[in-house]
Image (tube, rainbow, N blue to C red):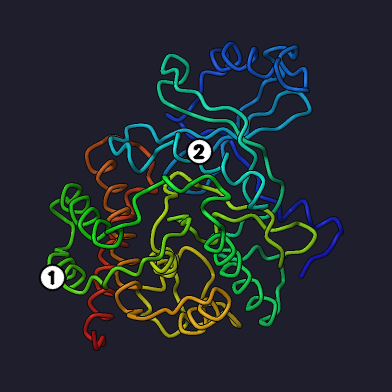
């Protein structure tokens, strides 16, 4: 594991040039933001246009994330993807509201700065937040990280411990008692994602009908649990300290956050989880190195989560299968945009193969389940 030396800079998450077709109008952006920033303690509005720079973080298939540099200061700008018609999946206002609520009670949340609803600026809602410096891990570990198997295990357990911290927040303290509709949440999720999948289905997509029916028939009884849930909690949505790669310093991408059953949040996170004993085809589509030596199994994660939160995790096959189905529906929505020419991003072309892989894994779970 690296420590404080020259390799830190090589591990930090770095933005790159903005992808073609996803550029921002920097002149219009400065015109709008200059008066806003003039009200802050930093006199950033005085910096000339030439000092305003925009670059783009390369990860993710959903909302777009940019680094806005103004002289010596750095901010992060978030906006929906170009060509998206699914407003509920790219709700900037929801993300900004949850960050505002968590600002003083969840130390991993970025600080919200400004929310813009003026469509004349960028043609969409967007918001500005603080920039958290650190390491973002995606499909593979950076070669310089050099974690031992024991450190890999601890890092992944920490990932889920922080999720448990989120689920332990008092709703009243956060002022989020009315945020979301926890009653009937699980059934609405099954029905809602089933509709979204069918609406986005293309001729080359698999038939999830039997899987959707299996989920519908096995929706658990109301648990009465109502907690803040992230709804897209995964490895590349957290930032690790550059000085201690076992410490989380930031949690990102809150646009799908709500109040609901925390076991659904756990299941959705494990929908991304690929372990060493999974089929090779499924592992080939992994989004994080969760099959690395030392990584805990899904069963170990569930046991730890239950122990640390005090929540009994029953009917795990249901939550895990739903997590993978939901991920397939998201992937299909992404692929739909590419299939119909709404985006030129070539990464989207590969999503249909991942949807098929998730379909096969759901069938595998159902075939082995005793629910």
Task: Assess disc 1: are there few (<14), some (14-19) or many (≥20) residues with their C-alpha within 10 Å of its C-alpha.
Answer: few
Q: Height in image: 291 above or below 117?
A: below
Query: Which percent across, then down, holds residue 370?
Result: 24, 88
The residue drawn where x is 64% and y is 12% is 35
Which residue position is annotated with label 2?
A: 97
Query: Which percent across, then down, holds residue 190?
Result: 24, 61
Considering every residue shown, the one lying at the far front of the view is: 172
The residue drawn where x is 28% and y is 57% is 189
Q: Is 280 on the left or on the right of 358, as rendered?
A: right
Q: Secondary structure at mark 2?
A: helix
Query: Which percent across, then down, holds residue 88?
Result: 33, 40
Q: Height in image: 346 above or below 264?
A: above
The residue drawn where x is 30% and y is 72% is 321
Identify which residue, 147 or 39, lies in the foreground.
Answer: 39
Image quadrant of residue 3? bottom right
Identify which residue, 268 or 188, lies in the foreground.
Answer: 188
Identify which residue, 309 or 364, lies in the foreground.
Answer: 309
Task: Assess disc 2: are there few (<14), some (14-19) or many (≥20) residues with their C-alpha within 10 Å of its C-alpha.
Answer: some
First in sequence, mark 2 or 1: give its number. Answer: 2
- Quote the CA–CA distance across marks 2 and 1: 37 Å
Image quadrant of residue 129? top right
Quarter of the image for the N terminus: give it.
bottom right
The residue drawn where x is 38% and y is 78% is 280
Mark 2 or 1, closer to the camera: 2
Query: Which percent across, then down, holds residue 159?
Result: 59, 67
Q: Is 192 on the left or on the right of 132, as rendered?
A: left
Quarter of the image for the C terminus: give it.
bottom left
Which residue position is annotated with label 1?
A: 210
Q: Secondary structure at mark 1?
A: helix
Q: Is 291 on the left or on the right of 6, as rendered?
A: left
Q: Is 170 on the left or on the right of 283, as rendered?
A: right
Q: Height in image: 82 above or below 159?
A: above
């Amino acid at each position: 594991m690296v420590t404080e030396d020259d390799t830190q800079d090589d591990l930090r998450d770095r933005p790159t040039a903005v992808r073609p077709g996803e550029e921002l109008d920097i002149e219009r952006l400065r015109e709008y933001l200059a008066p806003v920033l003039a009200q802050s303690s930093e006199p950033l509005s005085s910096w000339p246009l030439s000092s305003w720079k925009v670059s783009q973080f390369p990860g993710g298939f959903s909302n777009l994330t940019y680094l806005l540099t103004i002289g010596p200061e750095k901010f992060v700008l978030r906006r929906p993807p170009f060509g998206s018609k699914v407003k509920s999946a790219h709700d900037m206002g929801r993300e900004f509201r949850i960050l505002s609520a968590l600002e003083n009670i969840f130390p991993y949340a970025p600080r919200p700065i400004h929310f813009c609803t003026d469509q004349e600026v960028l043609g969409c809602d967007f918001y500005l937040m603080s920039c958290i410096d650190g390491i973002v891990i995606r499909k593979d570990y950076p070669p310089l990280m050099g974690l031992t198997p024991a450190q890999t295990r601890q890092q992944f357990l920490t990932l889920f411990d922080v999720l448990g911290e989120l689920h332990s927040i008092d709703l009243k303290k956060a002022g989020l008692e009315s945020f979301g509709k926890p009653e009937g949440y699980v059934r609405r999720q099954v029905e809602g994602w089933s509709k979204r999948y069918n609406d986005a289905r293309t001729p080359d997509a698999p038939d999830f009908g039997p899987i959707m029916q299996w989920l519908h028939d096995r929706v658990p009884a109301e648990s009465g649990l109502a907690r803040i849930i992230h709804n897209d909690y995964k490895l590349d949505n957290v930032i690790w300290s550059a000085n201690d790669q076992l410490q989380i310093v930031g949690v990102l991408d809150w646009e799908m956050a709500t109040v609901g059953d925390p076991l659904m949040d756990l299941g959705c996170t494990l929908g991304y989880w690929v372990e060493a004993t999974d089929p090779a085809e499924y592992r080939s589509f992994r989004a994080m190195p969760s099959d690395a030596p030392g990584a805990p199994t899904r069963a170990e994660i569930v046991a730890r989560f239950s122990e640390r939160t005090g929540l009994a995790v029953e009917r795990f096959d249901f939550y895990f299968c739903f997590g993978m189905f939901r991920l397939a529906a998201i992937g299909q929505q992404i692929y739909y945009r590419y299939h119909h020419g709404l985006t030129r991003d070539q990464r989207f072309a590969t999503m249909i193969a991942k949807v098929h892989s998730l379909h096969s894994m759901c069938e595998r779970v159902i075939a082995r389940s005793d629910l």
